[in-house]
Image: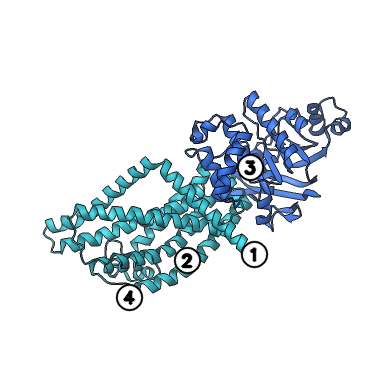
Chain colours: A blue, B cyan
Amino acid sequence: MTAVEVHNLRKEFLRRDAERSGLRRRRRRVPALENVTFAIERGECVAILGQNGSGKSTLVRLLSTLLLHDGGSALVFGHDVFKEQRAVQRLVNRVSVEASFFKKMSSEENLSYAARFYGMTGAETRERIPMILDRVGFPARRRHEAMEHLSRGMQQKVSLARALLTSPVLLLLDEPTTGLDPRSKLEVQDFIREVWASHDATILLCTHDLAEAEALADRVGILDRGQLLCLEPVDELKERYRAETLEEAFFAATGREFEQEDEDAERGVFA
Amino acid sequence: MRGAAATLRHELIGLSGVLERNAYLVKRYVWWELAFFVWSLANTLTIVFIAKGIHAAGGKLDVDRATTTLLIGAVIWSYLGVVFEILTETVAWERWEGTIEYTFMAPLARPIHLIGMGLFAVVYGVLRTAVLFAVIAGFFSLSLGGANFVAALVVLAVASVSFIGIGMMTAVLPLISPEKGMQMGFIAQGILLVISGVYYSVSVLPQWMQWLSTISPATYALRGIRHAILDGYGVGAVWGDIWPLIVIGVIAIPLGLVIFGVGERHAKRHGKLKRSG
């Protein structure tokens, strides 16, 4: 079964020019995603690689029902993301680069609040929250501590726990390990692997970490300036671009070094 | 039928989540809540002392009655402030904490989300207002033996439906303008009170403002509560103020939901439904 079907998906943002036309600043449309087409099968883990501003977060936010598109279509398990938002919301959860929480509230309180929106009762969360926190390696004695007292790595583990608590069949990971120290990064990656193996979850991982993409994903796509240039298994990708490494393949596909920032800075404002 | 019951159960659990989260936040910010209460107390005292001030300057007035009239105006102002503030936090606080994306991508109907915020605002606002009223009334040793508090609470409860509806309309403003949206809520609150006779009878207003006062729920709330507390009127006697509140409430809630929905779609189209705006 196809988990995600995206066809010619397009998203633009309005941007004000510095120059004025009369009293008003001119506005123009800046494309964040341009005719992106791909499909993910159920149970697959697909990584989308791209620099800052390439459109990765826009893609995740479109699939999370947080943005409306300007063209094309997107289906999640056969449900139209833009017309059947409630049905899609029940199936999807995400982990983003920022582990966003109510900082004064504890991990348990934050998870409990999030779970209610997915229909979990107090009795259910009392049982499942300690279990899931334990699974992500979160120390039991810190469950009642305010989130603001936890390290970034700890917070990201709670973020993963929040996403998994609702048993999503599609997990959207938007740079989940960016900014983490090497140890936390490995722990989070191990956990993603474990979840993927034990849950019946499909994973879309957007990252600019080449090693992470290679280690976790069945297929890797390159998103560059809003365009999906390719999406295939790493070996085929390397073969197609006659590259030894994923970094070389990225360079061959985009014509730019991976670490080089996108010169089109305005795209970064949105994507 | 079973599907509808399951959906209703799901929504009610979601609504309880909204109430639960707000209760957690009050608990976690309890000292700030106390500080805010002291501010409300000082603010209310400043207004209520005006009656004694006029009397001391030679003005002829029933000081107790004028003090109670001003007190009712000040506590309703305070109540309205709490209701609007909590509803505006539907977006503003979530954006500040960065949780807005998680909350708005969750499968919870927006009307349930907003009604949950409104319910919490009313319960919290009523408790806070009651304490504020009791403290100031005690401070001035006001004689309230003849007051009908039940009727006053009924008027406040019915008025709250309209206040929640208007609060929903202002709650969407931080989605449209992340920087200034919250302040726009204060403007709406200010306009509502100036035309509603918060510290005076609406009859002193210019004609065009008097016309506007007829569509403000605060006009009926203030008048009904004053009759109940100052004159001891029962629910039947203040029905003339209750039925317009019901009519305004029936219009305000759906209108608030529609306006919030339009604002949310605008935010989703223009990429404003995110933590950094």
Answer left or right for B271 relative to B134: right
In contact (CB < 8 Å): disc 1 and disc 4: no
**3D distance between C-alphas at marks 3 and 1:** 28 Å
The reply to whether callout 2 and callout 3 are in contact (CB within 8 Å) is: no
Give whichever of discs 1 and 4 has the lower sequence position: 1
Residue at image location 30% in from the left, 61% down from the top: B198
Q: Which residue is mark 2?
A: B252
Q: Relative to A235, does residue A95 appear above or below in the rendering?
A: below
- Percent coordinates x, y for residue B110 in the rendering: 56, 57
Instruction: Give the amino acid at mark 2.
Output: Ala
Establish if A1 lies above or below B203: above
User: Which element carries disc 1, helix, strand or loop?
Assistant: helix
Element at label 2 = helix
Give left or right: position of A90 versus B239. Answer: right
Q: Position of residue A166 (x, y in %)?
A: 63, 46
Q: Amino acid at mark 4?
A: Gly
Residue B236 got which mark? 4
Say which chain tag 3 marks: A
**Circle 2 crowding by C-alpha within 10 Å: few under 14, some 14–19, many from 20:** many
Quadrant of the frame with the C terminus of chain A:
top right
Q: Is residue B121 left or right of residue A251?
A: left
The residue to which callout 1 is attached is B2
**For mark 3, what is the residue?**
A163
User: In the picture, residue B63 is in which quadrant?
Assistant: bottom left
Distance CA(mark 4)–CA(mark 2)? 24 Å
Which chain does the numbered disc 4 sit on?
B
